[in-house]
Image (spheres, grey):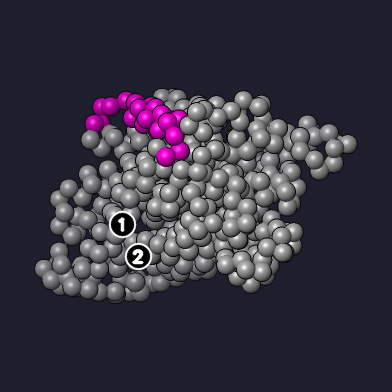
Amino acid sequence: MNRKLKSRQVQMIALGGTIGVGLFMGANSSIKWTGPSVLLAYALAGVFLYLIMRALGEMLYIDPATGSFAKYATEYIHPFFGFLTAWCNVFQWVIVGMSEMIALGGYFAFWWPNLPQWLPGLIALIIITLANLASVKAFGEMEFWFALIKVLTIIFMIIAGALLIFVGVGNDFHPIGLDNLWTHGFFTGGWKGFFFSLAIVVGSYQGMELIGVSAGETENPQKTLVQAIKSMIWRILIFYIGAIFVILCIYPWDKLGEVGSPFVQTFAKFGIPIAAGLINFVVITAALSGANSGIYSSSRMLYTLADKKQLPHKFTLLGRNGIPIYSVLAVSFGILLGVILNMVLPLIYKDASSIFVKVFSASILPGMIPWFVILVSQIKFRKVHQEKYADHPFKMPFSPYTNYLTLFFLFVVLIFMFLNSETRVSVIVGVIFILFLVIIYFSKRDTKAGAKDL
């Protein structure tokens, strides 16, 4: 493959893959469960996600390969975990892509209520598929602009919110202040509600590992990837915590369900009459960004699986521009099922958001599998490559103790996801999918081959 992704594109790919549905759509749910203490939940999850990215960055610095964490799982844990990781990543991003195509129908209904729900998704899927087939540079450039729109919107919201909170701009210069952070309670759902909120919070950070998928197509990967990881976590924490901070200061947490989208209301409160249309446009770019990233990420995982002879050889075939054509087309076809579902499911569920949630929730547990294997494979990776660590500039801090602590944190999140009736189904769907992969792998595995690849 061609190393055509530049530093600015890699950083925006990571931001674009993370800042999206979880922030724009998940904020109300997480706030409902724990109130203003959700700020601590975002900070806590951010620390552990930073440790995961440091573990990945340590390995990428030595071995920057396409589909990196699936490759590391194969080599440093067991071939089964490489198989599991790659397929979970494919499943996660195809489901995310499907849900984004479904969501687009609801977004466009804001302007054209009589437009067929499935049409915007179909047109968007064709456009982003062509961009992914054109070249990795075209994908990177499209994702750069999608992510930039989201980032600039959030920055403007944080600045506008700060002026409203501390100066009173948009409120006749009467500062709103910080009282709403504690007047109506801080840990409103107790510790149980706090841990329930972590499911949405952690899910909203999914996509950070996209850096690892892009490693094999990045210019000067050691320098670019280290820079991206170092800067990305602070930017994401600022964007997430900053945006949620503004929302919680402006509105009492228990009134957010009455005001619709807190993002729309924040812009409206600042005196921007086109707030609803503006945020709707931004959310559309977030949906396009998610599907665009999904095609890129999962097609590279299909390439990795085929390279390990776990899929037909044609999935490794590259076009003249270094793109795995069949892998891209296969993923796009999977996402196309989301467009078809958008034709059928409205006959059963009248609420478009209900359809979106039912599809999107299936991606949460499979999306966490790459994090588990990154943390485990890095421990073995460090032992195997000890000679390369003398002058390594980007080591995982306090490894392996931080690995074990982060693994424990992820398990706790999964336990509380299962205990919560609103997220239990997503865990069960993920477990069923993983069990299906276990059966497929070991039913086909030649027992005499031991731990060799299929």
Q: Which of the two residues, 241 or 106, is positioned nearer the viewer here? A: 241
Q: Amino acid at mark 1?
A: Ile
The label shown at residue 154 is 1
- Left or right: residue 313 versus residue 90 is right
Q: Tell me the amino acid under the disc marked 2.
A: Gly
Q: Quadrant of the N terminus?
A: top right
Residue 446 figure quarter: top right
In the rendered image, residue 373, in percent from the top left (x then y), is placed at 66, 53
Q: Quadrant of residue 119?
A: top left
Look at the numbered disc 2 and give the secondary structure of its residue: helix
State the residue in front, 94 or 14. Answer: 14
Residue at 39%, 67% (x, y): give it: 36
Q: Upstream in the sequence, badge 2 or badge 1?
A: 1
SS class, disc 1:
helix
Magenta stretch, residue numbers: 112-137
Q: Is residue 182 above or below residue 271?
A: below
| Residue 253 part of the magenta segment | no
Number of numbered discs present? Answer: 2
Residue 129 position within the rendered picture, expressed as x and y whole percent measured from the top left:
43, 30
Can the viewer see residue 333 in this picture? yes
Q: Are marks 2 and 1 in contact (CB under 8 Å)?
A: yes
Return the residue at label 2.
Answer: 242
